[in-house]
Image: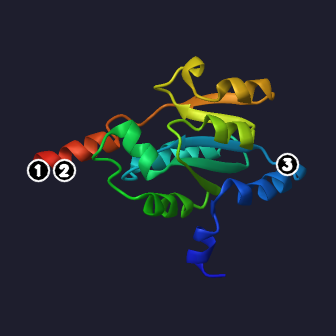
Amino acid sequence: MDNLTLIENKILTLDKLFPLLSIWKFQDKKTVFTNGCFDLLHRGHVDYLAKASDLGHKLIIGLNSDSSTSSIKGPHRPITDQTSRAQLLASFFFVDAVVLFNEETPYELIKAIKPDVLVKGADYTIDKIVGADLVTANGGEVKTIDYIAGYSTSAIEQKIRNSV
């Protein structure tokens, strides 16, 4: 199988993810879930996602769709379309699945996936992490990861605007 096909096979609907979740559960693989817009991938994203992946065996990323990203970030976002963002995320060797969602939060996605570990950036407190209640009720863990200072999509966007 060629590499592009391998990457595209990681971009899944929830229906296509369910059989994989069953296999991973049978294999006693710990699933890790995180989510975000991941617009303009940068070093901070790579660091965050690699560390999230280290918390288990299978990393699943819930990716905000274009409409979801716009409703959260404003009318000028996303900068990069959902297909491009999904493909870039899926190209990381440590990412096992990317699932798009249209809602503002991944609550329903987390409810369906039932990950063993839910991860967000350390700018969130655990009581403010969407889906933390679901994960802990299922016996899972909720973790936060520190960001690398100075790396954010907003900072990149501002730098671009200032240079024009």
Q: Residue 65 carries which label?
A: none
Q: Where is residue 109 in the image (x, y as percent from the top left)?
A: 65, 42
Identify the mark nearer the N-term, 3 or 2. 3
The residue under label 2 is which amino acid type? Answer: Ile
Residue type beneath disc 3: Lys
Q: Which residue is the site of mark 3?
A: 25
How crowded pointer 1 is (Cα within 10 Å; few <14, some 14-19, many 20+) is rated as few
Disc 1 to disc 2: CB gap under 8 Å: yes
Residue designated by label 2: 160
Res 1 quadrant in image? bottom right
Q: How far apart are marks 3 and 1 (CA)?
A: 49 Å
Secondary structure, mark 2, is helix
Question: How far apart are the two marked residues, 3 and 2, measured between alpha carbons?
Answer: 44 Å
Badge count: 3
Which residue is most to the left? 164
Q: What element carries label 3?
A: helix
On the image, the x and y values in percent for residue 91 come to: 54, 64
Q: How far apart are marks 1 and 2 (CA)?
A: 5 Å
Residue beneath the point at 45% across and 44% down: 68
Question: Mark 1 — residue?
Answer: 163
Q: Would you say 158 lies left or right of 97 here? A: left
